[in-house]
Amino acid sequence: MYNADKFFTGQSREFALYNRALSASEVLTLSGDNTAHGHPRYSG
């Protein structure tokens, strides 16, 4: 088990690399959280 990072104490279920930055809506879709709302400052 990797234990070199003393600040991360959780677990990760998935890991993915992308060749570009994901949009906010793509991140929301991938997270599976359909209850999140955009930050008022950034949601147009």
Image: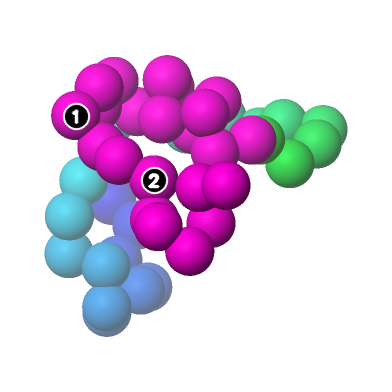
Q: Main secondary structure of the magenta part?
A: loop
- The residue that disc 1 covers is 35
Q: Residue at x 54, y 38 (%)?
A: 24
> Which mark identifies residue 38?
2
User: Rounded to the nearest whole Å, what is the CA distance between mark 2 and mark 1?
Assistant: 10 Å
Q: Residue at x 27, y 67 (%)?
A: 8
* Residue extending farthest right: 19
Residue 10 place in picture, x, y as percent? 17, 55
Residue 7 location, quadrant? bottom left
Front residue (pair 41, 10): 41
Vertical relation: 9 (above or below) 17: below
Q: Residue at x 40, y 57 (%)?
A: 40
Residue 14 location, quadrant? top left
Question: Which segment did they paint magenta?
Answer: 23-44
* 26 lies left or right of 1: right
Counting labels gives 2
Residue 39 location, quadrant? bottom left
| Crowd around label 1: few <14 · some 14–19 · many ≥20 (10 Å) | few
Amino acid type, mark 1 = Thr
Amino acid type, mark 2 = Gly
Residue 14 lies within the magenta run = no
Residue 22 place in picture, x, y as percent? 66, 35
Front residue (pair 43, 25): 43
Residue 42 place in picture, x, y as percent? 53, 56
**Residues at badges 2 and 1 in contact (C-beta under 8 Å)?**
no
